[in-house]
Image (tube, coloured by chain):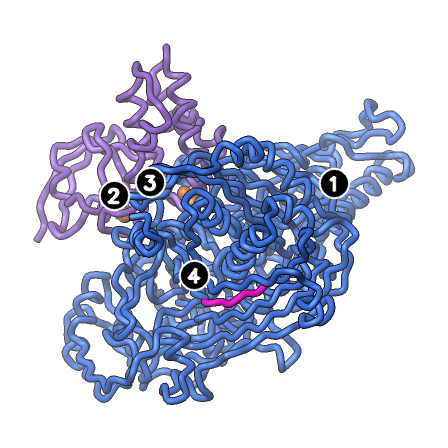
Amino acid sequence: MQKEITCTINEKQYVLSVDVRKSLLDILRDLGITSVKEGCGVGECGACTVLIDEIPADSCITLAVWADGKTIRTVEGESANGQLSKVQQAYIDAGAVQCGFCTPGMIMTTTAFVEKHKDCKVSREDIRKGHAGNLCRCTGYETIISAVEMCLKDSDNNDSGKN
Amino acid sequence: MAVGKSPRRKDAVAKVTGRARYTDDLSMPGMLYAKYVRSPIAHGRVLHIDTQKAQSLYGVEAVFTFEDVPDKRFATAGHPYSLDSKHTDIADRRLLTGHVRYQGDEVAIVVARDRLTAEAAVELVQVKYEEYPVAVNAQTALKADTPPIHEGGNVIGSHRFEVGGMLEKAFEEADEIVESHYQTGVVQHCHIENHSTYAYMDDMEHIVVVSSTQIPHICRRIVGEALDIPWGRVRVVKPYIGGGFGNKQDVILEPMAAFLCMKLGGVPVKIELPREECFISTRTRHSTRSNIRAGTTKDGVLKGLDIEIFSNTGAYASHGHAIMGAAGSKSCNLYPRSVIKLKATTHYANIPTAGAMRAYGSPQVIFGIECLMEEAARAINMDSLDFRIKNVARQGDINPLKEKEILSCGMVECLENGRELIGWDAKKKAYKNQTGHLRRGLGVACFSYGSGTYPACVEIAGARLILNQDGSVHLQIGATEIGQGSDTAFCQMAAETLGVSFDNIHVVSTQDTDVSPFDTGAYASRQTYVVAPAVKQAAQELKAKILAYTALMTGQVPESLDLIAGNVVFANRPDKVVLPLDKVAMDTYYHKERGGQLTADVSYKTRTNSPSFGCTFVDLEVDIPLCKVFIKEIFNVHDSGVIIHPQMAAGQVHGGLAMGIGMALYEELLIDENSGYIYNNNLLDYKMPTCMDIPDLGCAFVETREPTGGYGNKSLGEPPNITPAPAIRNAVWDATGVKIDEIPMTPKTLYRHFAKAGLI
Ligand code: FES
Ligand code: FES
C-alpha cells in the first residue's frame, strides 16, 4: 500500500508516495541520501540516526509515513557552500573518523547535542550519556568525545550548527 | 617532511559529509536480492527439502539448494596462495550444505526481485532434518565417540614447538613452578557495516564482484577456485569499507554472489547480511581453553613456559589451522630468554565458525601467559612489574623460535613509561590491605606481536605512482584502506620520499583487482610495514625520472637537481627553483617530440618480519556486591617503531583498547551447551560496549627505529587489543584477592567467583 507524505529533507520540500511498510531509512536511501547507514535495522546501533524536528532518531525504526509533516536533517545537509559544519570539522580535527560507517549518525547525534547544550557546562560523562545510542567499533569513543568537547568549547559565541 | 606529522586523513571529508560510498550505497538497476535458508539446528542432515512454494511466490527468480551447487570444496581463509602443497588452507566448504554443522548453516538460497520478497520466500522453503549429537566445546568434540563434524575427525590441526632449550631442564632449574587453567569466550568483530556484496557480468566471460572485503586480490583467487573459473576472469572491487577487524579477511559471500549471478544470466545479484546473520554466519574469535605452567627462580628469572591450548574453530576451518601457530610464534618474542614449549590443538565444534580477528589468536594466548606471570611473580614475592622488566625482550635478544635477532625493542621502556603514567609504585602501596565493598587494584600485562606473516606466507606489496599534468601525483596501491588510515599513511610516505606536498598526493582508495597493483590486503598488521618499501621505491624511481626529465629540458645534469616541496631545485641551492613540477609535468605530457607519462610501478616482497611490543596498565575499582568493574585509568604503551601519523596511531590504540575491554568485561556470544542454540546474535543482547562502558583511554608510544621498516616503522593495527584483558584480570585480582581465570568477567562470572571466595 502506498501513502503520500510531505516532508522537508535538508531544507528541500518533498512530496513522496511511500510504501507503508518502508522505514524512513529505506526512503532516504532510495532518494540517494546514503549517508544514512544501516548497521542493524532494529534500533541497536544508531548508524541510521537522523534529526526529526531537531531530535535524533533511529530512522530504521521510524516508519516513513511518520515523517509526514516533519523536518529531517541528515549529514548531507550539514555542509553548505563547501564549508563543513562545526561538528563535521571537529570530528576531523579530533581524529574521530576511522572507517566512517558510524560517522554520519554519530555527527547528527552530536549536532543535536551541541545545539541543545550550547550554553551549559557539560562533562565528558554528560557527553557519553548523550551519545550512548550510537555504537562505534573503531575509535573506542575517545576522540568522538573529544570532538564533542571541541564543539562545545567553540560554541560560546557562535552558532554551533551550520556555518 | 610528512612522516611523523598528522595531516588530515585523505578520506576524512568524504566520511563526515556522507559522500563516501560503501558497498550498500552502490546499487544497480534490476539488482536481485539473495537470502540464505539457514538451519535451525546445530548438527544434522537434510532429509528432505521442498522449495516449490517459495519458487511460486511472485517476485522470486530462483531457489537453489545444496543439491544444485557444484560439488566442489573450497577454503575461505584470506591467506596468500601457497606454492607448498603442505601449506594450503583447509577446503571444507561447499557453497551450500546438506550436512549442517552449526545453527545457521546454509542449506539453500532464494533470489528475488527485492529484499522483502526474498525474506518471505525463505520462510516458505520447507526442510526436514535428521538431528545428530551436538558438540560445542573441546571436551565433547574431542571425545572418541563423538560423531565427526567433518570427514577425518574433529581435530583440524596441531602446532608444537619447544624452543630455547629443554623445558624439563628449565623447570629443574626453577625454584617455583606455577600452573593454571584459562578460558576465553567467543567474541565477535561487530564492525558496524555488515557483510555485503554483489556481482554482475559485463559480457559472457568476466564477472565483477563488488564487496566489503579486506582482501580483494585473495578474494579474486578464492572466487575463481570455488567456481572453477580462471582467476583472470574475476574482477573484485572494494569500495569504502565500514570496518573489518579480520572478519572481512575471509571470503564469505563473494563466491555465492558470483555463482548466482552466473546462473541468472549475468544480472546483478546482491547478498547483504542483516546483523543477526552477520553474528552467526561470518566469523568470530576462537574461544580457547589452556593450561599453562611457568617456572621461575627465587630471584625472578623466568626459566620456562609450557603452554597447552585448545582452540575451538567451530563449524568450518576458516583460519583455524593457522591461528594458534601464528599466535604461539609471535609470542616467542616476549620472553625470548626462556624455554618455551607450545602444544596447541584446534578442533571443530557445532558453533559458528571462528576466523581471523584482530591480533589473530594472540589475545587468547597472551591472556594465559600474562595471567600466569602475575602468579609467578606472587609466588616469589616479587612485584609483577619488576618481574616482567627482568624477563621481557631487549634489543639484541634472539627470538628462540625464528632464531632471528630482535633489532629494535622498546619493551622495557614501555613498561617504565607505563609505571610513571599510572603511578604504579605509589598506588601499589596505597592499595595494600583494603577492606570494604569498593576496592582498587592495579594491573599490567605485556605482549609481542609480528609485522606481517613472513615467513609463513609471502609478503608482497605493490605501489604505483603517476605524475599528473598539474604536478600532483596519484598513488595507486593494492593494500586496502579499511578505516585504519593506511591510504593516508602511504601518501605521507610518498610525499616524504618524493618531495611533493602531502596535499598534492592523491590516492585511489578503491581497489580494483583489474587495475590496482597486486597486494594481499589488510591483515596481520602488515600494511604499513610491508607496503612502505614498495611506496618508497616507487617514489625514488619517480623522483629519478622527474629529475632526469628536468635535466633533459634544462640541460642540467640530473645529479645536480633535487625535488623539494613540488619544485625541482638545485641540490646544493634548494632555495633556487629550476622548474616547478607542473611545468615539468605539462612538458612530459604534451611536448610533441619528447617525454611521455611519468610513472613508477613497484612490486616488492618483504623478507623480514620485525616484532612490535607494548603493554597495558590499568587502575580500576571493583564494586564487590554489585560484581562490577569500573576502570579509573587505562593506558596502552607501544613500541611500534617510528610512528607515521601520531593521531591515527592513537586512534588504533583507542579502538584496540576498547575492543580489549569489551573482551575482558562484557562480550560473549552465548551458545547452549547441549543444543548449540545461539542466544544473543544481535547488538542488544550481545554486549558490545557503548561510550557509557568505555572509560577515558590513554596511550603513549616509545619510538624505536626498526632498521628493516621502510620508515623505521613496525606493526600497530592489531596489537592494542592484546593486553587489556589480562591487565584487567590482574587488577581485579590485585583489588579483591580473587583470581579469575576466565573472560569475559561479566557480573555473573564475578558473582560466581566472589561467592566461592566468600566475599559475598
Ligand atoms: S540501523 Fe538503525 S539503529 Fe542500527
Ligand atoms: S569509525 Fe568505524 S564504527 Fe565508528
Q: Which residues are magenta?
A: B289-293
- Quarter of the picture containing the N terminus of chain B is top right
Point out the tag, 3 or 4, that comes first from the N-terminus: 4
Closest to the observer, B505 or B616: B616
Question: Between tags 3 and 1, which lies in front?
Answer: 3
The purple one among the chains is: A
- State how far apart marks 3 and 4 are (Cα): 23 Å
* Residue B70 showing in the rendered view: no
The mark found on residue B184 in the picture is: 4
Residue B470 drawn above or below residue B214: above
Say how many tags the image has.
Answer: 4
The mark found on residue B497 in the picture is: 1
Disc 3 target residue: B623
B640 sits left or right of B36 in the view: right
Q: What is the chain letter for disc 2?
A: A
Q: Locate residue B614, reporting x and y percent.
A: 61, 46
Please report contact status of discs 4 and 1: CB closer than 8 Å, yes or no. no
Please name the amino acid that badge 4 sits on: Thr
Disc 2 target residue: A28
For the point 39% across and 58% down, the residue is B188
Q: Are marks 4 and 1 on the same chain?
A: yes
Q: Is mark 4 within 8 Å of ligand 2?
A: no
Classify residue B127 by image quadrant. Answer: bottom left
For the point 46% across and 62% down, the residue is B182
Ligand 2 quadrant?
top left
Residue B290 magenta:
yes
Point out the tag, 3 or 1, that comes first from the N-terminus: 1
Dominant secondary-structure state across the stretch colored magenta: strand
